[in-house]
Image (cartoon, rainbow, N blue to C red):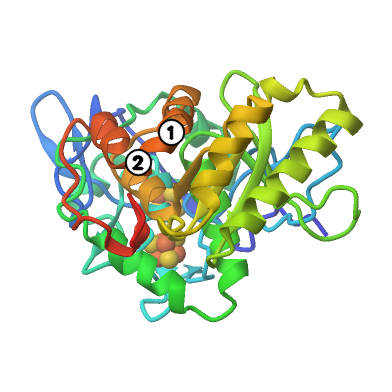
């Protein structure tokens, strides 16, 4: 069985008669608009055969072949299995009760058809005006559609998100969801891929490679990923040091060239030894171990940003300040509208 084969048998989709010159998101509560020379029309699902809102490609969730790490081949974009395919409308179908509003599917749709309405992903089929811009095709034209999607202007975020506090709601759901570790691991991997990295999840199997995951950054740098759904911040540090040692000793990666990352749901509290030990690791070994939260990554994603090595280095250098608020605000070029210390998303909660 090919795990990456999409389960839908959609049969039909659309191609553009003429590509729009812009794809703009004016608000998070509505689909984008497709801009043409003389008019704008509301974006809608073109039933694309590759369905990036639902599935990652094998390359996006793989590690370099020499690192025999990947054990989790689940290509689903939705971390809570809320998306299926509706054969009647030929569009993704969202289970509104399941959806936690992470916005991953929204960010992945290249035509800007999906949006969050009241914190739930929504997608509508094309109306008559939109259909006038499209031609219905069958799967034999999947290549043409794919080429058009590659040439389509990237979604522009004129008003990226109305409400930063939405990350509070997602974070809260992640702290109370059943099967929490698995969902947090999947949302972390998936948001990192959506931010432009290759992210592979490991964990089971070979006891020598027990790292949670491996990240390949733009430009080719690599590093271990540790995901901490709870508050065991020192264990996360120990685990990532272990992963760095394995990558250095078994795979000959130069230690100081590795780019490690720990992702928390909430940053360790000020009282936890994490901050002190992490500073000592830098002082003694010369290694900086940056930490971010799922919420901080979502703020970047919702604004159409990518996660660059430059940002990672800034986060690593800010360890002493115990906050990532200003770094995220600088990237978004605006203040973050989240109460201080809220759930440890941008600074420790206590
Ligand atoms: S919602 Fe977007 S990504 Fe998903 S099938 Fe429709 S056009 Fe493709
Ligand atoms: S917003 Fe997140 S949880 Fe909701 S359907 Fe999309 S990917 Fe799934």
Q: Is residue 262 left or right of residue 174?
A: right
Q: Nearer the viewer, residue 244 or 74?
A: 244
Say which label, 2 or 1, has the lower sequence index.
Answer: 1
Q: Residue at x 15, y 48 (%)?
A: 27
Q: From this viewpoint, is residue 51 visible?
A: no
Asked if disc 1 is less than 8 Å from ligand 2, the answer is no
**Residue that mark 2 sits on:** 324
Q: Residue at x 49, y 58 (%)?
A: 272
Q: Which mark is residue 218?
A: none
CA neighbours of label 1 inside 10 A, class few (<14), some (14 to 19), many (20+) = many
Mark 2–mark 1 contact, CB under 8 Å?
yes
Give the quadrant of residue 182.
Answer: bottom right
Q: What separation in Å lies between label 2 and label 1 (alpha carbons)? A: 7 Å
Q: Residue at x 59, y 28 (%)?
A: 283
CA neighbours of label 2 inside 10 A, class few (<14), some (14 to 19), many (20+) = many
**Residue that mark 1 sits on:** 315
Q: From this viewpoint, is residue 302 visible?
A: yes
- 256 versus 116 height, above or below: above
- 145 versus 167 height, above or below: above
């Amino acid at each position: 069985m090919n795990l990456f084969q999409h389960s839908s048998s959609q049969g039909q989709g659309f191609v553009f008669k003429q590509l729009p010159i812009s794809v703009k998101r004016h608000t998070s509560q509505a689909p984008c608009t497709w801009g043409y020379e003389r008019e704008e029309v509301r974006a809608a699902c073109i039933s694309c055969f590759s369905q990036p809102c639902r599935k990652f490609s094998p390359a996006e969730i793989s590690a370099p072949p020499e690192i025999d790490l990947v054990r989790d081949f689940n290509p689903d974009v939705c971390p809570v299995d809320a998306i299926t395919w509706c054969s009647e409308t030929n569009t993704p179908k969202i289970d509104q009760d399941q959806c936690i509003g992470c916005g991953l599917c929204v960010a992945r749709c290249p035509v800007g058809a999906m949006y969050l309405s009241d914190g739930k992903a929504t997608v509508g089929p094309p109306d008559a005006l939109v259909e006038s811009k499209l031609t219905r095709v069958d799967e034999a034209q999947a290549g043409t559609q794919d080429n058009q999607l590659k040439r389509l202007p990237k979604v522009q975020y004129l008003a990226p998100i109305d409400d930063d506090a939405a990350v509070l709601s997602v974070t809260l759901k992640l702290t109370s969801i059943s099967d929490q570790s698995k969902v947090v691991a999947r949302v972390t991997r998936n948001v990192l891929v959506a931010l432009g990295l290759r992210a592979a999840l490991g964990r089971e199997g070979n006891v020598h490679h027990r790292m949670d995951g491996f990240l390949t950054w733009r430009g080719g740098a690599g590093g271990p990923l540790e995901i901490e759904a709870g508050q065991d911040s020192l264990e996360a540090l120990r685990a990532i040091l272990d992963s760095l040692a394995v990558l250095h000793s078994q795979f000959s990666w130069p230690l100081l060239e590795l780019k490690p990352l720990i992702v928390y749901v909430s940053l360790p509290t000020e009282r936890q030894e994490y901050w002190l030990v992490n500073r000592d690791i830098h002082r003694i070994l010369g290694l900086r171990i940056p930490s971010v939260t799922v919420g901080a990554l979502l703020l970047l994603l919702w604004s159409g940003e990518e996660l660059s090595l430059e940002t990672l280095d800034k986060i690593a250098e800010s360890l002493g300040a115990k906050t990532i608020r200003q770094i995220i605000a600088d990237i978004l070029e605006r203040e973050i509208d989240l109460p201080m210390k809220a759930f440890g998303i941008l600074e420790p909660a206590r």
